[in-house]
Image: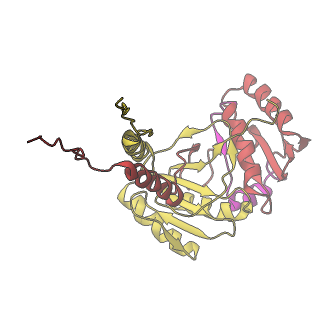
Amino acid sequence: MKKLRVQRSRAYIPTASMADIAFLLIIFFMLTTSFSPVKMSVDLAEAANREEVDKDAAIVAIGPSGEMEISNGINPGNRINSLDELDIFLQEVVMQDPTKQFIIKADREIRYDVFNAVYEKLRNNNCRRIALLTEAKQAPAGQ
Amino acid sequence: MAIHVRNRIPAEIPTASMADIAFLLIIFFMLTSVYSSNFGLQYGLPKNEPLTEVQPLESIHVHILGPGQYTVDRRPATLPQIAGYIDMKLKQNPKKPVIVQTDPDVPYYATIEVLDVCKQLRVESVSIPTSSEIAMWNNFAGGIGGVTQ
């Protein structure tokens, strides 16, 4: 008697659509993510009542050791070493756009006098609109 | 003559590794990107001109001495007590300004906590005095909040 050969198909997991899913994820993140021109990493203070700031606002970042980085909101950030450099930067930005918003992106642990030095420069240069960057307040544990 | 049926392999582009490449790209961008936080406490600053508008005697003076250490109109208070005090004063006068003064060695987040309370209570006018203003007010009626209403 002739033996019947059963044609076996190999078991496999279809992975062709995985690439589509992954590229869709890339496109989604590219469209929804906003990148900060200032690369300095700071631990922001927390606040519960926050408002959205302007997308093209100028940024003054103050790191945990008082180091500073500035950006006009369009160009990549530059490290500065003195408040005089900040003065020049603020004058230039305000001259170009007197209604420009300025974001102070300060580390939560810096001494107040470090923040105050930057704040006074903003006031002295007639910067009208400022925003203190914060992150969302975490709910207390157990709630 | 018997016709040979050839076992043909279907032509295909191998795409199995595409997913690996795409996920590697995602991980690379996630690790190297600095995301911007777009939310904060917004304030409109007054012009830097001689003080004529701000009247310390008619405002609520919150003094931050350290994290969790506050005085409101020269009386020691906790943050919830400050919120209650400001709320009570705002009911009497909704336009009452609040002056937030912080000692130089206090961490910045302590100021943000008080400003957050002011924002929550919808205080119309919040003033963060500069060092020159504080120096000026210190020579006036014994400092900010020297006389309260």
Seen at 52% across and 51% down, the residue is B36
| Residue A101 drawn at (x, y percent) | 47, 50
Which residue occupies the foreground of this view, A69 or A141? Answer: A141
Quadrant in which the C terminus of chain A is drawn = top right
Above-or-below relation of A6 to B38: above
The relative height of residue A53 versus residue A86 in the rendered view (above or below) is above
Residue B55 appearing in the image: no
Q: Which residue lies furthest to the left in this view?
A: B1
Q: Position of residue B17 (x, y in %)?
A: 39, 53
The chain letter corresponding to yellow is A
| Residue at the outermost right position | B76
In the image, what residue occupies the spot 66% across and 46% down? B127
**Residue in front for this viewpoint, B121 or A74:** A74
Q: Position of residue A84 (x, y in %)?
A: 54, 74
- The picture places residue B74, in percent across and down from the top left corner, at 88, 45
Residue furthest front as drawn: A1
Q: Colour of chain B?
A: red
Name the quadrant of the N terminus of chain A.
Answer: top left
Would residue B51 be seen by someone viewing this image from the given angle? yes
Q: What are the residue bounds of the magenta stretch? A: B121-144
Foreground of the two, B56 or B14: B14
Is B129 left, or right, of B107 in this rendering? left
Of B132 and A138, the residue lying toward us: A138
- Is residue B130 within the magenta segment? yes
Q: Farthest bottom residue?
A: A81
Colour setting: by chain
Q: How many marks?
A: 0
Q: Which residue is drawn at 39% across and 36% down?
A: A9
Residue depicted at 64% across the width and 38% down the height: B125
Find out whether residue B26 is within the magenta segment: no
